[in-house]
Image (cartoon, helix red, strand yellow):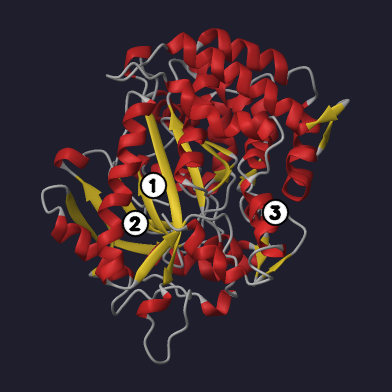
Amino acid sequence: MSNPGASDETPARTVAQLAEVLAQGCKPRDAWRIGTEHEKFGFLRPEAVKEGQKAYSAPPYAPNGIEALLKGLQKFEPDDWTSVLDNNNIIGLKGRGDAAGAAISLEPAGQFELSGAPLRTLHETAEELTAHFDAVRPIARELGLGFAPLGFHPTATRAELPWMPKSRYAIMREYMPKVGSMGLDMMQRTCTVQVNLDFGSEQDMVRKMRVSMALQPVATALFANSPFVEGKPNNILSNRAQVWTDTDNARSGMPACVFEDDFSFERYVEWVLDVPMYFIMRDGKMRNVAGRSFRAWMNGERQDGLEDVTPTIGDFEDHITTAFPDVRLKQFLEMRGADAGSPEMMLALSTLWTGVLYDDAALESAWELVKSHPWEDYVKLREIVPLMGLDTPWGEGTVRDLAAQMIAIAMDGLQGRDMTDESGQTEWVYLAPLTSLVAGAPTQAERWLERYYGAWMGDVSRIFLEAEV
C-alpha cells in the first residue's frame, strides 16, 4: 500500500478529466513492463529470543525490529535507497540508482513488502527477487529476525501483532470495523504477491481487465497458501482470500461495471468516485475524511472535513490507491488474487499473468475461454475457491481443469514473447510449479496441511523456518 501524497494540485472537476489520468498509462508494446510486489511476515528466530519474548512472534517496529531492518538496508546499500518518513518515523525506502523504480514498504503489522521495479523480462524479475532476499537475509539474521511469505498469519491473534506508525493505517484501523467483519484481519494478518502489467490502449485495458478479473479466482486456487488460523487448520485453503469476502465490499471484490458493455476508463472512474474516501494530504499532513464521498466533494456538495479545500488530481490519485478490487486499475493493472508464497511461486505468478496478457493471441484465447461462462459464475467462484481450491466444481469438471487451460494459454503467450536470457533459457520455465499443480501435485496450503498432520505433529510454528526465505 503506497502513499505517494497529493502531488498534482490541478483542480479535479470532471469524470473525463480523471479518466485521462488513467489513460496516461497507455504505452506502446515495447514499453510494457513487469512489476512484481510481494509481502512476507517477520518473526523472531528461536535462537535469538530474549527473556520476555516468544519464538516466532512478530517483531515490533522498534527497538531491534522493523525500523532497524529498514535502517540496516539503507546503510548496507546507501546508493540504492532513500528513507520514506511519516511523522519522522521511517516507514519505507524508495529506490534510486540500481534500485530505481523499486520501493520497500510496510503493511500494517510490519509485513515487509518489496514493490519491484518495472522490468522487461521475467528473467530480470527472478534476479530482482534473489537480490532482495540476499540483501534482507543477513541484516535480518543480525537482528534475530526471519521472514516467511504466507497468505495469512498462521499463529498470531490480531492482539498479538504490532501496528506500524503509518498515518494511513491509523485511519483505516478506525474505519475498517464499520464496514466489514474482517478488515482488521486483512490489514494485520494477510500477505499477498501481485504483478503489475501495462496496457496499450483503452480497448486493450478493457480486454485485459475482464480476462484477469474473471480468472483471478483461478490464481487464488493455484496460489492458496494460508490454511491455518491461530495455530490450527480451519478447513479453508486461502484464509487471505476468505478475509477479502467481507473486508469492505464497497471498495473490493469484482465490480460489476467491468463486464458491462460501456466499461472504459470513465466507467472505472465512476465506480471509484463512489468508493468512500479515507484521507487527503494537505501541507504534508494526512487528514482523516473516512467515509466521505469524493463524487459529492467534486460536485461542490458539503462534506465534513473538506469544506476548506478543493479536490485535486493528486487527491484522486491518492483515492485510487484506497480501492481494492481483485484487479486494480491505475496507470497499469494490478493482479491481486494470490496468497504470498515461495520465491518460485512468486515468480510463477508474474509468469502466468505475463503469458496470458502480453501476447495478442494468448489474450484472445483467454477471452474466448472467459466468455464461455456468464460473469455471475466467476463471482460465485470467488466465494467458493478459498475453501476448496483447485477442487472447486467448475462446469463439468473442476477449477483444476480451468487452471490447466489458463496455463496452456500462458505457455503459448510466453513462447510468442520469445524472451530468452543469456544462457538461452526461456521465460516459460518459470511456470513449472503450476504445471505440477494442475497435474495433481498438492498446493502450498495442502502441502502444509500434510506436514501439520504428519511430521509437525500438530505444531504449526514449524512452518516459519520451513517457509523462511
Quadrant of the rendering where the C terminus is positioned: bottom left
- x%, y% of residue 253? 66, 43
Quadrant position of residue 153: bottom right
Q: Which residue lies under the disc numbered 1?
A: 315
Above or below, 44 relative to 401: below
Above or below, 24 relative to 114: above
Q: Which residue lies under the disc numbered 2?
A: 281
- x%, y% of residue 15? 49, 31
Q: Secondary structure at mark 2?
A: strand
Q: Secondary structure at mark 1?
A: helix
- Given the image, on which type of amino acid does mark 2 rest? Met
Residue at image coords 38%, 13%: 29
Mark 3 crowdedness (10 Å alpha carbons): few <14, some 14-19, many ≥20: many
Residue at image coords 47%, 24%: 429
Extreme-front residue of the structure: 455
Is tag 2's residue or tag 1's residue first in the polypeptide sequence? 2
Q: Nearer the viewer, residue 33 or 387?
A: 387
Mark 2 vs 1: CB contact within 8 A: yes
State how far apart marks 1 and 3 are (Cα): 31 Å
- x%, y% of residue 123? 35, 27
Residue at image coords 37%, 15%: 419
State how far apart marks 2 and 1 are (Cα): 7 Å
Is tag 1's residue or tag 3's residue first in the polypeptide sequence? 3
- x%, y% of residue 459? 63, 72
Q: Secondary structure at mark 3?
A: helix
Q: Which residue lies under the disc numbered 3?
A: 242
